Amino acid sequence: MPLSCGCDFDGGDPGQTCYWYATDFEKLQTSKRKRCASCGELIDIGSYCLVFPRFKVPETDIEERIYGEEIPRAPYYHCEKCGEIWLNLTEGLGFCSEAWENQTELLLEYIHEYKPQKLETK
């Protein structure tokens, strides 16, 4: 999905897996290294990354009674480089993109489409 100026999220359909947006970096505190959902690089334990908590919307009343309104799923992770791009595109510029998309490609798309002017340095 290319860059978009708006996000349409209605809370998810039954059985759909969704995620919450990450808003700040945190140190990876897992027992194993994790793979970046964007570029595929391994993130070392203790390195800064973005964590996107994921959940599944219950499909049945039984699932909802057992787990509640959100069934936990393994989170997505972004390495520091991809996380920085994601935060700049979403939080900084207001674009909508998916956490599993290649953030470097989205940045190149932004540069190609909008041709931002370079900042002058003294």
Image (cartoon, helix red, strand yellow):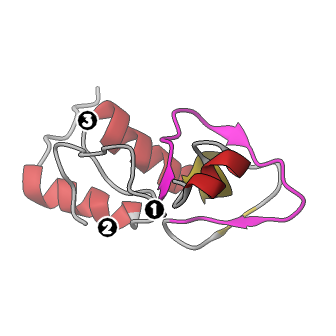
Segment tinted magenta in the rendering: 17-37
Q: Quadrant of the C terminus?
A: top left
2 and 3 marks in contact (CB < 8 Å): no
Residue 16 is tagged as 1
Tell me the kind of residue under disc 2. Answer: Glu
**Image vertical order of residue 5 relative to residue 57, above or below:** above
Q: Which residue does the image show at 21% across and 63% down from the upper left?
A: 2
Q: Earlier in the sequence, mark 3 or mark 1?
A: 1
Tell me the kind of residue under disc 3. Answer: Leu
Task: Let me know if residue 28 is in the magenta part.
Answer: yes
Determine if residue 5 is in view: yes
Instruction: Report which residue position mark 2 lands on.
Output: 105
**Quick one: SS at disc 1?**
loop
Disc 1: CA contacts within 10 A as few (<14), some (14-19) or many (>=20)? few
Task: Let me know if residue 83 is in the magenta part.
Answer: no
Disc 2: CA contacts within 10 A as few (<14), some (14-19) or many (>=20)? some
Q: Between residues 101 and 45, which one lies in front from this camera angle? A: 101
Q: Earlier in the sequence, mark 2 or mark 3?
A: 3
Q: Between residues 106 and 75, which one lies in front from this camera angle? A: 75
In which quarter of the view is residue 105 placed?
Answer: bottom left
At which x and y percent is residue 97?
32, 53
Q: CA distance from mark 2 to mark 1?
A: 26 Å
**Image vertical order of residue 122 relative to residue 65, above or below:** above
Residue 93 is tagged as 3
At which x and y percent is residue 89?
32, 43
**Quick one: SS at disc 2?**
helix
Q: CA distance from mark 3 to mark 1?
A: 28 Å
At which x and y percent is residue 39?
51, 70
